[in-house]
Image (tube, helix red, strand yellow):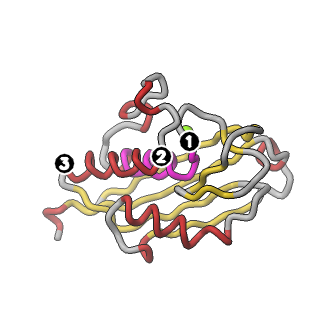
Amino acid sequence: MRIGVGYDVHRLVTGRPLVLGGVTIPFEKGLEGHSDADVLVHAACDALLGAAGEGDIGRHFPDTDPRYKGIYSIRLLESTLTILRAKGYSVVNLDAVVFAEAPKVQPYRDEMQKIMARAVGIDPQRVNVKATTTEGLGPIGRGDGIAAMCIVLLAEMKDS
Ligand code: MG
């Protein structure tokens, strides 16, 4: 078994769609970034790569690479799984927290869990997405951005 953690934050700006956990959420602002800036999926990719001893998302999918411009980050999560499988790992479970003052994440949680679970080849019951505000404190509390943290557990195929 191997454990990994990932954390990411992106700035909220006008004129961008808000994509979280692979779901487009109606909101007045979206996250700024080279890809779709899906902060939750980026945290998941980093947790998975970390658990596998494969560095981080910037090493595998650099934001200077035009191939990743505007990319739906679920595609990066799928590519991450390919990297893990090649090293003999499978995902046991994934737990994540989104830090956002707004919008409410809860109505979209089931869909996020389903989409992310499909991307990493596990049952949706093994993906858990939570959300919290920061009680108005700091940049997240002011609505300047959204952050996410993710923890994953991997099994080595030879374990099973
Ligand atoms: Mg990111």
Extent of the magenta region: 38-49
Tell me where residue 96 sits by quadrant.
bottom right
In front of the other: 149 or 144: 144
- How far apart marks 1 and 3 lie (CA) works out to 26 Å
Q: Identify the image quadrant of the C terminus.
A: bottom left
Amino acid type of the residue that numbered disc 3 sits on in the rendered structure? Ala
Residue under the point 35% across and 60% down: 120
Rendered-image quadrant of the N terminus: bottom left
Decide: is 110 above or below 131. Answer: below
Of labels 2 and 3, the one closer to you: 2
Near mark 1 (Cα within 10 A), the count class, few <14, some 14-19 or many ≥20, is many
Q: For ligand 1, tell me if the residue under mark 3 lies within 8 Å.
A: no
Quarter of the rendered structure image containing ligand 1 = top right
- Earlier along the polypeptide chain: callout 1 or callout 2? 1
Residue 61, labelled with which disc?
none
Count of marks overlaid on the render:
3
Is the residue marked by circle 3 packed among few (<14), some (14-19), or many (20+) residues within 10 Å? few
Residue behind mark 3: 86
Q: Is mark 1 within 8 Å of ligand 1?
A: no
> Which residue does the image show at 81% across and 46% down from the upper left?
143
Q: Which mark is residue 73?
A: 2
- Would you say the residues marked 1 and 3 are in contact, meaning their CB atoms lie under 8 Å apart? no
Whole-angstrom CA distance, mark 1 to mark 2, is 6 Å
Q: Which mark is residue 36?
A: 1
The disc, 1 or 3, on the residue closer to the chain's N-terminal end is 1
Q: Residue furthest bottom?
A: 125
Of helix, strand and loop, which mostly describes the magenta segment? helix
Q: Amino acid at mark 2?
A: Ser
SS class, disc 2: loop
Labels 1, 3: front one: 1
Residue 121, image quadrant = bottom left
